[in-house]
Image (spheres, rainbow, N blue to C red):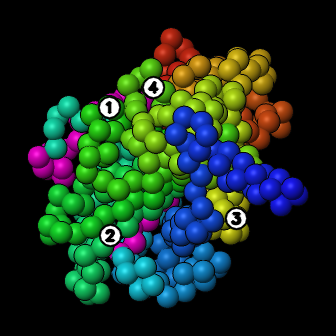
Amino acid sequence: MSLLVATLMGAAIVNALSARQNITPLSTFQIDSFTSYTYFASAAYCTAAQTLAWNCGTNCQVNSGFLPVASGGDGDFVQYWYVGYDPSLSTVIVAHQGTVPSKITSLTTLDPTLFPGISSDIEVHSGFKDAQEATATDVLAAVTTAMSKYGTASVTAVGHSLGGAISLLDSVYLPLHLPAGTSFKTIAYGLPRVGNQAFASYVDGNLHLTHINNKEDPIPICPGMSLGFVHPAGEAHIEDSGEWAACPGQDNPSTQCIVGGVPYIWDGNESDHDGPYNGVKMGCGKAMANAVPHTLLTDSFVLAVQPFVFISWALNCMEARTYIERGFVLGSPQYQRQSLAQSWPYSLSLLPSSVFRLIRSLHRLSPVSGKVYLTQLPKF
C-alpha cells in the first residue's frame, strides 16, 4: 500500500502542471538543456573587450570552448553584443546586453531596407527597433564570418530583458540576409512584449522561439496588451516551486504562466527579473555593480519623495510621468550621482535609491508648462 501511495504522490507532483489548461512541465533534461544559453545571455552584460577575449569569469568559464568572432557596443548608448561559435552546440551564438532603456513607447513598422519583404502590418516597439538597428549590420557581418569560418548553418540568438527583444528582432532580420537553409533558434529571458499581433503571428509562423520568465517578474507583461502589444508563443514559466511550465499559445492567461501569474504590475517582484534561471543570475559579476540596474517601481500611486519630485506609475506599466519642479533637465545618461547632486537644487540625500535610479534612467526630458514632463519605458 505504501508503494502505491508513493507512486501516486510522485505522479501527482510530475503531473501537477499538466492537469490544468494544457500546461505541461519541462523535464530536468529539458531545463538543463538551456543552461549553456543562459550563461551566454548573462555574458552579454560584460564589456566588448571581455567577450572578444572570452575572459568574463563564470559566464565564460562554463562555455570554455566558445570561439568569439566579434563584439561591440559601449554599454550606454549601444548595448554590448558579441558573436561567436560554440563547437559543443554546433551553432553560431548571437548575444545582446539588456540594460539600456527604451526611449519611445509607440509601435512602428520595420525598416524595409533591413527587413525586405516584411509586411507593413507588422509593427514593433520603436525603442527596441532602434536598439536592434544600431548593431544590425555589424551583427550580420559577424554572423556571416562565423558561419563561413566554422562551416555551420545554425544560428542561435540569446538575450535577457531588452537584450532578448533585440535578439528576437535579430532572428527576424538575419534570415532575410543569410543563405536559405540556415536554421535559427531564439532563447530569451525576461522578454518584454516586442510587437503587435501581426508580429507575434509572424514569429510563431517563421521562428523557433523560447522565452523564459522567472516567477513574478513584471517585465514580461510590459508593454501592455491594451497598447496593442502581444507575446508570441513559446513561453516557459519558472514557478515558485522551481518547476518549469510550458505555456502554449500567445499570452497564456493561466496563473501558471506570466500573464495570469502577474496580471498587474504591482503583482510583480522586480528581484525575479535577473533570475535565477535554473541557478543562473544575469550579470557580469562585479561589473553589474557599475551598471545601471533594472529599475521598476511596482506601486501604482503618486509618490511624494520630497515636495519637489513626484512620480506617477500608469496602470498599464508603460508610462512613467515624472514632474520635476524648477525645469531640471538631464543630459547624458552617463552622469554620476555626484554630478547630478551638484546640479540639483535640493538635497538628493532624501531620495530613496530606487527613485534615484529611475530618475537616472530617464535621460531625455522635455519642458512642458514650466515643468519637466516625460513619457518613457522604465529601465530593462
The prevailing secondary structure element of the residues shown in magenta is: loop
Give the structural element (helix, strand or loop) at label 4: helix
Check disc 3: other Cα within 10 Å, few if <14, some if 14-19, many if 20+: few
- Counting from the top left corner in percent of width and height, residue 191 is at 50, 46
Residue at image mark 3: 279
Q: Position of residue 361 (x, y in %)?
A: 58, 41
Q: What whole-number distance in Å separates the C-alpha atoms at marks 4 and 3?
A: 30 Å
Cα separation, mark 2 vs mark 4, equals 30 Å
Q: Determine which residue is flagged by label 1.
A: 197
**Do residues under tags 2 and 4 come within 8 Å of each other at their CB atoms?**
no
Circle 4: residue type? Met
For this orientation, the residue located farthest to the left is: 117
Instruction: Tell me the distance, in whole angstroms, between the alpha carbons under discs 3 and 2.
Output: 25 Å
Image point (60%, 75%), residue name: 59
Q: Are marks 1 and 3 in contact (CB under 8 Å)?
A: no
Q: Are marks 1 and 4 in contact (CB under 8 Å)?
A: no
Depth order, front residue of 254/141: 254
Q: What range of the chain is rendered magenta?
A: 92-117
Q: Which mark is residue 155?
A: 2
Pointer 2 or 4: first along the chain: 2
- Would residue 80 be found to the left or right of residue 264 on screen? left
Label 1, label 3: how many angstroms apart (C-alpha)? 33 Å
Which badge, 1 or 2, is on the more N-terminal residue?
2
Q: Which residue is mark 4?
A: 225
Q: Amino acid at mark 2?
A: Val
